[in-house]
Image: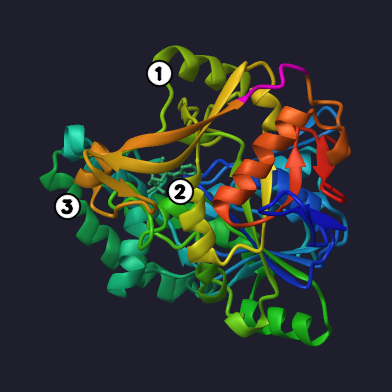
């Protein structure tokens, strides 16, 4: 099996090579990772979420059913896979209980045998959500555009060493004590900002109820995964959000508060870097961004609205419309470097089927200065203008295509250019939201 290479020639990249694979988003999130994880999960034994919280929203279409996952790894949709919520995730216990119940209602089997919650993951609690919203409204025009799910404040408490962890839910007296201190302190902040304080009794009862439900799923994630490795099981690490939202490597401060990059998979699960065999980067055939922050290749309003509609570019978590733009290889080349991406999965190619002309951004220019990598100073990035290469559209539907060689020539030329500019071969192309609407790149030559 082969992938498309820089020169458009064959290179051995087995789509089915699994071992320990990390899947990362190569842009600003919403790359369609759920869709690709679903394809790769088939060959894995364990699927691990390693960062973020229920700010993420993966959507997987199987037949006519649509499953939306926020905290639970998409592997849950495959019978027989063990799904792990790793220590690097922040868990809203009430939201997780709802998610489990909703999936069960849709007929998905979820038991302590196929879902494990790492005991050292930190909790997202109601005051985190209120503080998230309060900080955003205080920032006014400077707001980040967070999902208001309390993610930043929860990671903030973790770093400040005042967080409450999943394992705390298991010891009622200790949990009550920790929660009381946190609620008292946060109520003072909320009152000072003119907000309504939280009732300790109500929050505590709600959390302990969720804790009782989750108890059988809570385990030591590190031991579990190391045992799995000893048994030579294949582990798939599923990142949420994307490289440009990484708190260190993204467009700070317009980022999330965790590490969606490949390094985050090790820290967020307890698996050492020496045990990782492959990194797959998922990128959309164009670019989208939700929330605030600079976006050099954003389309003009007309094309932006058109692609948003055709691509159904609305957040699964917040319903917000995503900004859309041309494919930016400066961004993805950077993601390739940071994550050590071995191969790319390109999603939503079909959304571009109708265009007569497409552009790929290959560099930025600010006056006389050219940039091949993304400037980290956002004032510089805001001033950058994209340098584009133009490609002919294919203007025919790709939705029915299942073999790479059956894609229209202009589509293959466009994909080869993406691969060349981003420095990684392409192993998977998706041409529709459904599980079977996937082109596994076997022989591109
Ligand atoms: P937070 O993660 O809710 O704190 O939001 C911080 C930034 O990350 C905002 O710009 C969000 O829109 C963005 N963000 C968070 N989760 C996702 C996601 O799953 N997809 C895309 N953007 C996200």
Is residue 240 highlighted in magenta?
Answer: no
The alpha-carbon separation of the residues under discs 2 and 1 comes to: 19 Å
> Where does the magenta region start and end?
392-396
Q: Is residue 135 above or below residue 308?
A: below
Pointer 2 residue: 331
Location of residue 189 in the rendering, given as x and y in whole percent from the top left corner: 17, 52
Q: Quadrant of residue 397?
A: top right
Furthest residue to the left? 192
Mark found first going from the N terminus, 1 or 3: 3
Residue at the spot 63% in from the left edge and 76% down from the top edge: 221
The alpha-carbon separation of the residues under discs 1 and 3 comes to: 41 Å
Residue at the spot 31% in from the left edge and 63% down from the top edge: 156
Say which element carries label 3: helix
Pointer 3 residue: 189
Q: Is residue 304 visible?
A: yes
Q: Quadrant of residue 398?
A: top right
Location of residue 126 in the rendering, given as x and y in whole percent from the top left corner: 38, 50
Name the residue nearer the viewer: 444 or 255. 444
Residue at the spot 71% in from the left edge and 16% down from the top edge: 395
Tell me if label 2 and label 3 are in contact, CB under 8 Å: no
**Crowding near the residue tagged with mark 3, few <14, some 14–19, many ≥20 C-alpha atoms within 10 Å:** some
The alpha-carbon separation of the residues under discs 2 and 3 comes to: 38 Å
Name the residue nearer the viewer: 110 or 147. 147
Mark found first going from the N terminus, 2 or 3: 3
As drawn, the label of residue 300 is 1
Q: Nearer the viewer, mark 2 or mark 3?
A: 2
């Amino acid at each position: 099996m082969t992938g498309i290479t820089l020169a458009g020639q064959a290179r051995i990249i087995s789509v089915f090579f699994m071992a320990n694979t990390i899947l990362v988003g190569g842009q600003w999130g919403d790359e369609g990772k759920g869709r690709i994880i679903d394809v790769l999960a088939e060959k894995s034994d364990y699927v691990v979420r390693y960062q973020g919280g229920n700010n993420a929203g993966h959507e997987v279409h199987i037949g006519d059913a649509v499953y939306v996952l926020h905290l639970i790894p998409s592997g849950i949709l495959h019978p027989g896979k063990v799904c792990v919520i790793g220590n690097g995730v922040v868990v809203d216990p009430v939201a997780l209980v709802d998610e489990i119940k909703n999936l069960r209602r849709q007929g998905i089997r979820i038991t302590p045998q196929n879902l494990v919650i790492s005991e050292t993951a930190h909790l997202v609690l109601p005051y985190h959500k209120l503080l998230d919203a309060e900080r955003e409204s205080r920032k006014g025009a400077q707001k980040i555009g967070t999902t208001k799910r309390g993610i930043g404040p929860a990671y903030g408490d973790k770093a400040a060493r005042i967080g409450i962890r999943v394992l705390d839910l298991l010891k009622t007296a200790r949990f009550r004590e920790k929660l009381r201190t946190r609620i008292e302190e946060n109520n003072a902040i909320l009152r000072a900002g003119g907000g309504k304080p939280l009732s300790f009794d109500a929050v505590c009862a709600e959390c302990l109820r969720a804790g009782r439900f989750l108890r059988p799923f809570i385990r030591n994630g590190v031991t579990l995964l190391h045992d799995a490795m000893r048994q030579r099981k294949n582990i798939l690490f599923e990142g949420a959000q994307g490289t440009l939202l990484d708190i260190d490597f993204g467009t700070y401060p317009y980022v999330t508060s965790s590490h969606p990059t490949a390094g985050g998979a090790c820290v967020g699960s307890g698996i050492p870097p020496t045990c990782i065999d492959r990194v797959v980067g998922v990128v959309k055939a164009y670019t989208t961004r939700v929330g605030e922050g600079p976006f050099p290749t954003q389309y003009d309003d007309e094309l932006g609205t058109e692609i948003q509609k055709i691509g159904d570019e609305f957040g699964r978590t917040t319903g917000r419309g995503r900004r859309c733009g041309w494919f930016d290889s400066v961004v993805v080349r950077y993601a390739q470097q940071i994550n050590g991406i071995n191969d790319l999965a390109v999603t939503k190619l079909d959304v571009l089927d109708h265009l007569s002309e497409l552009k790929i951004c290959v560099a930025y220019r600010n006056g006389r200065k050219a940039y091949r990598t993304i400037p980290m100073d956002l004032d510089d990035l805001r001033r950058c203008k994209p340098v584009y290469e133009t490609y002919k559209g294919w203007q025919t539907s790709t939705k029915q295509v299942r073999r790479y060689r059956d894609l229209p020539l202009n589509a293959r030329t466009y994909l080869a250019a993406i691969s060349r500019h981003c420095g990684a071969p392409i192993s998977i192309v998706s041409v529709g939201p459904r599980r079977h609407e996937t082109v596994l790149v076997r022989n591109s030559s």
